[in-house]
Amino acid sequence: MKYQYYKTYTIYVTFIKDLAQFLYDRLTKNDLFKIITCIAYKNFFKPVMPLTKQQKQQISDFSDTLDFTQRGGLMTDLDGTVIQQKDGRYFMPEPVKLGLADMYNTQCPVVINSMRFPLSVIKTFAEDWYTISKASVPLVSLNGSQTGFIHKEKKTGFTFEETAAFPLKEKDLKVFISDLDNVLKDGGNPVVFYYPRDWTKGEIIWTPDKGLVKEMKERYKSASHVYGGNTEKLHEDLSAEDISMIFLLPGEDQDNSARFTGFKDFYSHTNVDKLYGAKKMIAQLGRKIDHFIGAGDTPMDVFLKEVGLVLKVGTLNLNFDCKSTVLQIDQLDEIGEVFTELSMTCQPSKSV
């Protein structure tokens, strides 16, 4: 009997949550309905667990300090940290939107630190993000290889202004080409994704099999250009311009890729990663990384090593030590409440 009651309750709660999200997604053009559905989503159905007293104390211990309010800010990863993916659609859950809006309302600097390339961030998130920020967004992209700001121009729409870049050197390219040659010799069917410093070129994909170009174009919609050829041609193209990052997929199917464990997957300038890029971007803002709060979810988010407070989302092991307190957030939705709690102690500061 208790099980049947619980099962019915679970179905009911899931229906209410899905209905609230459905209404919100489709009624954003009507401010009155948007407000109503926001209230319903946040108050009638509470999709996240409330913060514990210990978590609130951990937040206030850091955010109450002048170091945070005057010289700090928030740096966050995107995918898996504040962005969810469902049925091929990437979106920010409503509780996270509300919490992030609370942070922006205090004029607390918010910096995105993502593996994504600038054009991907613009096409996928810029419109929604800008409705929250209402200002240019600082961005660390491509594993720390390129920093800058996403602006919204009246005539041209969203653009990216580079402030620093650390492209691969020829020695870095040679390491990559050597690894690629070894994958081919071992019978791999590699796909190479590379990202020119010229952000308008977006993502370019190379395959050794010209016959797969059409299929690749259909599979990877985010790519600006897909082509095939030999490794000599690829090396020539990579050397002809500044390249921010390269991603090597040894084989398209999981079983094939699993055979190749001795190679890197991401290639960037030696010693450049998300921590390196984070320090450069924060220095440009006239602030310090140990006064920042950092949010991330994977071992790639190495900027979490040196921030003043870590918001660790999900169950994946980071595989590195953080010098500061780590606040564990089990579900992505819950980070919105953390942002709201932070906003209560974040004093207005000079906007970036």
Image: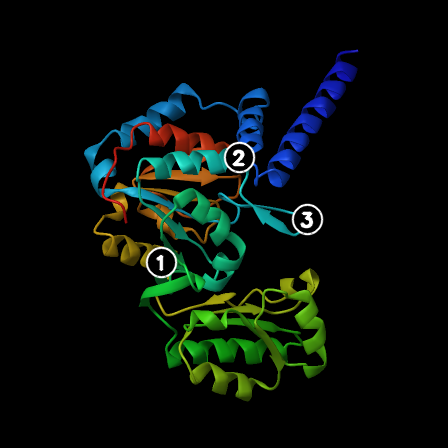
Tell me which amino acid carries mark 3: Asp
The residue that mark 1 highlights is 149
Q: Does dot 3 land on a helix, a strand or a loop?
A: loop
The residue that mark 3 highlights is 87
The residue that mark 2 highlights is 31
Crowding at mark 3 (Cα within 10 Å: few <14, some 14-19, many 20+): few
Q: Residue 311 carries which label?
A: none
Q: Residue, x 45% and y 24% (percent of image)?
A: 51
Asked if marks 1 and 3 touch (Cβ < 8 Å), the reply is: no
Asked if marks 2 and 1 touch (Cβ < 8 Å), the reply is: no
- How far apart are labels 1 and 3 at the CA level? 30 Å
- How far apart are labels 3 and 2 at the CA level? 27 Å
The quadrant of the rendering that contains the N terminus is top right
Foreground tag (1 vs 3): 1
| Horizontal side of residue 148 vs 89, given as left or right | left
The answer to which image quadrant residue 210 occupies is bottom right
> Quick one: label 2 or label 1, which is nearer the N terminus?
2
Q: Does dot 2 land on a helix, a strand or a loop?
A: helix
Foreground tag (2 vs 1): 2
